[in-house]
Amino acid sequence: MGDAHTKEVGEFYDRLDALFDAFASDFKVSRDIDIDINSAFLLNVCESFVYDITRYSMFHENEIPDRARRASYLCKWLMRFRPAFVKTDISSRSNDDQKLALLVNELFCMYASSGILRVDLETKITGRLFNTLLYSLRYRAHSEDAFILFFAHLSGI
């Protein structure tokens, strides 16, 4: 794909890495749990995301797919590669902390997706729906088409 593709992947990597740093900082403040990201896995996420966006744009002759599609591609690849991990020993922590640590990739996925969608998920969806979404991301098969429909509905696109 060449230098332009490599540059685009690098730029997206830098943005997603910075977004993860903000997420990890929030996680540390709210739960006193240190999390980190596997750089090789994050690079795979970014390469796959940029490839999907490029492929879609070339095939459909659209320069930039809509926000719901971009969020769904990101969600798909974050859930496939699961780059985030917990550094803190949580074995003696509360069940809530252990559950949040288990869902660190799903929570980051929603954090990053909400940024792409420009939607505050805490005000837009109920706690019950958010928990259902986290459960689905963790344990169910992932379909970018289902993500697109959900995110389009969520963002009013």
Image (cartoon, helix red, strand yellow):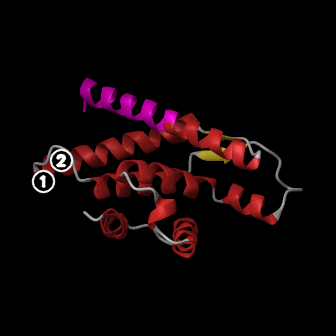
Q: Residue at x 45, y 30 (%)?
A: 14
89 left or right of 50? right
Quadrant showing the N terminus: top left
> Is residue 140 one of those drawn in magenta?
no
8 left or right of 34? left
Secondary structure mainly formed by the magenta segment: helix
Which residue is identified by label 1? 60
Q: Between 61 and 132, which is closer to the camera in this rendering?
A: 132
Mark 1 lies on a secondary structure that is helix
Quadrant showing the C terminus: bottom left
Q: Residue at x 44, y 65 (%)?
A: 124
Measuring from the top left, give residue 62's x and y in whole percent.
13, 48
Measuring from the top left, give residue 61's x and y in whole percent.
10, 48
Q: Residue at x 41, y 40 (%)?
A: 46
Say few, some or many: other residues with alpha carbon within 10 Å of mark 1 (under 14 / 14 to 19 / 20 or more): few
Q: Which amino acid does label 2 sit on?
A: Ser
Mark 2 lies on a secondary structure that is helix
Distance between the alpha carbons at the discs numbered 1 and 2? 5 Å
Q: What stretch is highlighted in magenta?
A: 1-18
Measuring from the top left, give residue 66's x and y in whole percent.
24, 53
Q: What residue type is labelled 1?
A: His
The answer to whether mark 1 and mark 2 are in CB contact below 8 A is: yes
Which residue is identified by label 2? 57
